[in-house]
Image (cartoon, rainbow, N blue to C red):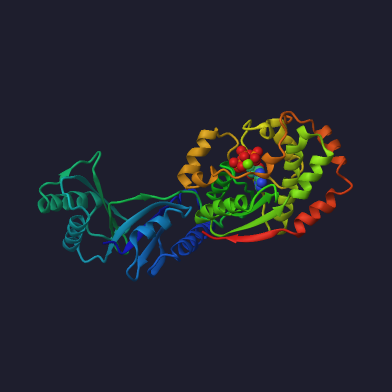
Amino acid sequence: MYKAFLIKYAEIAIKGKNRHLFEDALVHQIKIALKPVEGEFLISKEQGRIYIEALTDYDYEETVEQLRHVFGIVGICPVVLTEDEGFEKLCEDVIAYLDARYSDKNKTFKVNARRARKDYPMESMEINAELGGRILDAFPEMKVDVHHPDIMVNIEIRGRINIYSEIIPGPGGMPVGTNGKAMLLLSGGIDSPVAGYMIAKRGVKIDATYFHAPPYTSERAKQKVVDLAKIVARYTGPIYLKVVNFTDIQLYIYEKCPHEELTIIMRRYMMRIAEHFARETGSLGLITGESIGQVASQTMHSLAATNEVCTLPVYRPLIGFDKQEIISVSEKIGTYETSILPYEDCCTIFVAKHPVTKPNLNIIRRSEEKLKEKIDQLVKEAIDSVETIVVEA
Ligand code: ATP
Ligand code: MG
């Protein structure tokens, strides 16, 4: 029954020129999101509003589902747009709308009129009262409830008149592309896809790096990471995923360094390599799924040791989250089921029984000295042999 959507976004904090950039980026992201949907759409900006109008038949459910993945959208309102042909016509349109939308009329309602255009001959309060009366006349089963109505009949008098009563929540945040780009260290776990989602939600475009260790980790473990990137890409747009072969570096560290320091040293090399790709491709920071104290490599001491090798800022959006909180987000965004599939991770394979929880930086640096003969060459080979996969939703 709907031919158009009114898109609500949080505009309060965005002023001046930035607002245009925000709106243009949002329109761009909406276009990308609607590309796979059958049907043709016209997307337009009008006085702090974005409208999506269907020019052909289209799939309503699929359209809403796609829009629910666009950061920056706060509310998706299926709307009836009519020309202003006088108050009588408006009453008819609203009554026809309610009749079509709500087959069960045993409902309470409230009319909420707003005039964005002050030349309309009636004031908002007058419209509320008069239109409310007409609705009661047309549908005697309906009742007014001004505090908790079942149906909020929103009437906005703008260039055209907007009639809507449903607001489907969007994901909020800011449109991807309004805040630069960052490199996500993406593993097959629960945390890193959530971390990527959270940073992308603030308008940041995401690239990703995955370290695998064939034959210790399988092709299916890699496929799992690609699958996770695919789910995250529904929100972020295409993700350029760098797949790095980490086996030789890992074996070399295993051979030369104390095993309880292995995870920290490995982590430091992951950060160095991810940072190399970040710089090469214009990312302004790194993202990890770390959270304080979750495992030995994420104590405050360990995080400091890992962080030391990075010159770009490292964003850790889950730093203060409990595991259960992270799981809740991963369920909400749809990555959880894939994350818990039981494939091996390159870190778990070489993991020590008793990893250090308070690594001493001087000791770690000294251990890394033992790698100096071959490590630069191995890092170079890992970088040179990287495989880049463009992951699309
Ligand atoms: P996750 O659920 O994200 O795997 P985790 O609890 O398993 O997290 P760790 O294995 O200690 O934590 O990894 C911490 C962070 O380091 C991850 O969130 C991720 O950002 C990064 N990371 C770990 N392993 C890899 C990998 N194989 N490839 C890329 N990044 C990785
Ligand atoms: Mg992991």
At 21% from the left and 58% from the top, the residue drawn is 97
- Residue 284: x %, y % from top left: 67, 52
Number of marks in the rendered image: 0
The answer to whether 131 is drawn above or below residue 341 in the figure is below
Residue 80 or residue 146, whichever sits in front: 80
Which quadrant is the N terminus positioned in? bottom left
At 68% from the left and 49% from the top, the residue drawn is 211
The answer to whether 294 is drawn above or below residue 84 in the figure is above
Residue 153 or residue 56, whichever sits in front: 56
**17 left or right, relative to 252:** left
- Residue 195: x %, y % from top left: 57, 44
Residue 46 seen from this side: yes
- Residue 139: x %, y % from top left: 12, 51
**121 left or right, relative to 370:** left
Residue 315 seen from this side: no
**163 left or right, relative to 253:** left
The answer to whether 289 is drawn above or below residue 51 in the figure is above
Residue 363 or residue 349, whichever sits in front: 349
- Residue 45: x %, y % from top left: 42, 63
Most extreme residue toward the right is 373
**227 left or right, relative to 76:** right
Quarter occupied by residue 262: top right
At 89% from the left and 47% from the top, the residue drawn is 373
At 80% from the left and 55% from the top, the residue drawn is 380
Image quarter for ligand 1: top right
